[in-house]
């Protein structure tokens, strides 16, 4: 299928061929009929992409702060790869469309194949021929409403939510500053609610359009006409509400709002304009400044938008989805007319030229629609004959000189910044296929790392006999099932941690090993492969007595909206990350734990996990989220036999000896922070060596299982308040 994309680094716009997105549970696959260009938000994004790197940094100071923190935590090279990977990737455009349901995911019963729906969301209602849209971000189109008009649903919801924030009442007077697409819709909604409207915009054509659509009077905000109209309609008292629907860097809109608003009036910010509030003016009138958050309640809440958890109507009357349905109904009943706003309808194939014309000012428009080609009739599908599955036994060696052909399932931040940069161009490795549920991420990975093929069809990859190894780099909840399927398909598997989130999932993976005879499995526990830590362990030498290990993980707080916070579906944060630290401790102590004891600080995720080992050694992992962000992320001390091993965030390692050893009492090795190496490259080298030669996998399966079981025991330990004994899992 085709999709409009932009490279944020270069500013390049393209209509790209990408895989069709998969139809996941909790949503529908929609074939687009019309999608709407937001001439405000999207053109701002297009303009930002054309800036220099300094200009981009100035326009997004919030992102600059994140980069600085990432440098302190992960070092310069890793941060550089991550930042440049994001910048030099194709990003989607669009967030408002209308289309036909082509496929219905599990759990959806309010629409069926062939239904017309309006869709919202800057990750789901994209300028693309097909989109997967979760339940709370689509609404059925009422009978009689034209698809080109239904494509306005999202921007209409934005305007509607802004009006709701202003709480207009019959007979009031409102001022709308900025008569672009959103402003024009606000004018109509206010007029429909019995409010008298004055508009302000420097473009005479937009002023004239707003007056045709219901405004009493409109004019240039710098002229006396707007002030005169307000004085006439309000008897000199000022308007009851002001709606800021303007963009840009001028502070004129907020100053005009203060001047023309009545005492204790309401000012609602809908657009993205400068907000240096003149304190005296706002204080003396005691103005009520309100913000309107996009389409309405539910926005930026992943449980609402992605998991379909609705808010009870008795508590939240107007959610994103209800606003969308309401605006569609208003259009269907003639309460709002969007046809006069349509300045241009372009063929979808002409998208790049359309954006260029808008950016250069050749095409002056309030609203522009993309029209998509109607679907051609497909040839009937060939009959399918089921072929019984055959248990695949792993071979012990490969033909000399034959490259290892690799498929990636998932191509998110970790895969593209920490794994694939080590594989692109690696001798003896051939990047065969990348599989994602989001079409554009697959296309980005294919372009940047040289995959031969990009797809959203997992079964086709697992059934491809030419693929030797599969990397599972998806969200945590899918790891066990994808690993099980890949093992049954006879593939060598590299799965990012965690291997499993439940004991049943772990049992399922082991059942697949037993059924297939395929034990070629590696979990991404990379820290044991870190060169600095490996050298420190070698310098520390063998132990004769039990050891005491302390591991402080200064994990830091997660940003709101992070999928790591979705404990219901993705497990706890420690369930996802804890295996790293348990594996490192077990490797340093040359054993697997026999019991786990865990306690937590009330009200947060700060954990103390104590592991006991067969020889009496103990390891204490302090996993904290409340520490200072400037402190190193990981520090480790290993004490035994009069020796101490110290690791400082993979930048510095030391070993102290009680007595002189070879004339030294201390060994120290340091790296520059930018050279921090947590072992990913060495881990990958070991994995491919095992796949290529048929030799043992880098970490024994028993150890992977023991680490996973110990991680799963932490919640049980927290619930029971007592040590949890780890019984055999094989």
Image (cartoon, grey):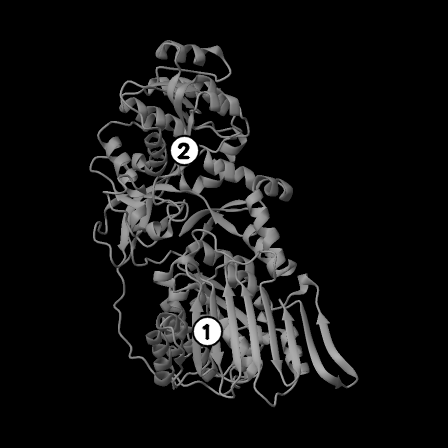
What residue would you read off at disc 2?
368
Give the mark nearest the N terminus, 2 or 1: 2
Vertical position of residue 310 compared to residue 274: above or below = below
In-front residue for pair 269/329: 269
The number of callouts visible is: 2
Q: Which structural element holds mark 2?
A: strand
Q: Residue at x 20, y 37 (%)?
A: 143
C-alpha gap between disc 2 and disc 1: 45 Å
Which of the numbered marks, if any, corresponds to residue 467?
1
Q: Residue at x 53, y 57 (%)?
A: 447
Q: Nearer the viewer, residue 75 or 9?
A: 75
Q: Residue 227's image quarter?
A: top left
User: What SS does tag 1 mark?
Assistant: loop
Mark 2 residue crowding within 10 angstroms, few (<14) / some (14–19) / many (20+) = many
Screen quadrant of the C terminus? bottom left
Q: What is the x, y in percent for residue 600?
A: 43, 66
Q: Residue 274 placed where, x, y %? A: 52, 30
- State the residue in front, 592 or 618: 618
């Amino acid at each position: 299928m085709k999709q409009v994309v932009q490279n944020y680094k270069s500013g390049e716009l393209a209509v790209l061929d990408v895989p069709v997105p998969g139809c996941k549970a909790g949503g529908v696959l929609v074939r687009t009929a019309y999608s709407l260009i937001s001439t405000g938000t999207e053109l701002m994004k297009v303009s930002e992409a054309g800036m220099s790197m300094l200009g981009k940094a100035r326009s997004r100071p919030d992102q600059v702060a994140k980069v600085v923190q990432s440098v302190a935590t992960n070092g310069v090279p890793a941060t550089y790869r991550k930042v440049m990977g994001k910048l030099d990737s194709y990003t989607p455009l669009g967030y408002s469309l209308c289309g036909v349901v082509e496929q219905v995911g599990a759990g959806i019963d309010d629409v069926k194949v062939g239904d017309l729906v309006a869709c919202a969301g800057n990750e789901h209602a994209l300028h693309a021929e097909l989109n997967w849209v979760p339940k709370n971000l689509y609404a059925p189109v009422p009978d009689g409403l034209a698809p080109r008009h239904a494509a306005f649903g999202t921007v209409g919801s934005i305007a509607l939510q802004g009006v709701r924030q202003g709480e207009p009442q019959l007979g009031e007077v409102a001022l709308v500053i900025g008569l672009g697409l959103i402003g024009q819709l606000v004018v109509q909604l206010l007029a429909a609610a019995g409010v008298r409207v004055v508009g302000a915009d420097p473009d005479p054509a937009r002023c004239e359009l707003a007056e045709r659509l219901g405004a009493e009077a409109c004019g240039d905000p710098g002229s006396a006409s707007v002030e005169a109209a307000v004085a006439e309609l309000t008897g000199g008292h000022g308007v009851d509400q002001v709606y800021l629907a303007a963009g840009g860097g001028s502070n004129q809109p907020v100053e005009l709002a203060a001047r023309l608003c009545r005492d204790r009036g309401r000012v609602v910010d809908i657009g993205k304009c400068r907000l240096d509030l003149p304190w005296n003016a706002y204080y003396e009138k005691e103005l009520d400044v309100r913000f309107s958050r996009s389409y309405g309640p539910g926005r930026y809440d992943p449980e609402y938008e992605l998991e379909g958890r609705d808010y009870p109507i008795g508590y939240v009357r107007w959610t994103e989805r209800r606003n969308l349905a309401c605006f569609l109904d208003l259009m269907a009943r003639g309460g709002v007319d969007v046809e006069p706003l349509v300045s241009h309808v372009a063929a979808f194939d002409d998208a790049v030229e359309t954006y260029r014309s808008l950016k250069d000012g050749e095409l002056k428009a309030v609203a522009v629609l993309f029209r998509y080609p109607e679907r051609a009739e497909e040839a009937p599908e060939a009959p399918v004959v089921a072929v019984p599955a055959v248990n695949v036994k792993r071979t012990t060696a490969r033909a000399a000189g034959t490259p290892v052909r690799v498929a990636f399932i998932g191509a998110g931040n970790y895969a593209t910044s920490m794994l694939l940069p080590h594989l692109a161009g690696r001798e003896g490795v051939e990047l065969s296929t990348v599989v994602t549920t989001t079409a554009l991420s697959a296309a980005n990975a294919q372009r940047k790392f040289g995959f031969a093929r990009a797809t959203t069809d997992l079964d086709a990859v697992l059934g491809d006999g030419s693929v030797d190894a599969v990397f599972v780099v998806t969200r945590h909840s899918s790891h066990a099932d994808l690993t099980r399927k890949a093992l049954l398909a006879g593939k060598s598997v590299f799965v990012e941690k965690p291997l499993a989130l439940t004991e049943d999932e772990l049992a399922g993976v082991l059942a697949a090993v037993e059924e297939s005879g395929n034990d070629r499995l590696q979990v991404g526990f990379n820290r044991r492969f870190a060169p600095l830590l490996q050298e420190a362990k070698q310098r520390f030498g063998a132990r004769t007595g039990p050891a005491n290990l302390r591991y402080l993980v200064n994990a830091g707080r997660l940003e709101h909206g992070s999928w790591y916070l979705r404990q219901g579906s993705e497990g706890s944060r420690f369930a996802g990350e804890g295996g790293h630290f348990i594996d490192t401790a077990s490797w340093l102590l040359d054993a697997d734990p026999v019991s786990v004891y865990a306690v937590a600080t009330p009200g947060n995720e700060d954990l103390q996990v104590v592991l006991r080992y067969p020889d009496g050694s103990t390891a204490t992992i302090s996993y904290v989220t409340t520490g200072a962000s400037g402190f190193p992320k990981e520090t480790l001390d290993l004490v035994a036999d009069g020796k101490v091993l110290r690791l400082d965030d993979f930048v510095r390692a030391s070993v102290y000896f009680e007595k002189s050893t070879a004339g030294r009492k201390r060994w120290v090795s340091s790296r520059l922070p930018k050279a921090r190496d947590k072992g990913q490259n060495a881990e990958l080298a070991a994995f491919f060596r095992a796949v290529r030669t048929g030799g043992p996998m880098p970490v024994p399966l028993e150890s992977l299982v023991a680490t996973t079981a110990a991680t799963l025991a932490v919640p049980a330990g927290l619930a029971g308040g007592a040590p949890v004994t780890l019984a055999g899992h094989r």
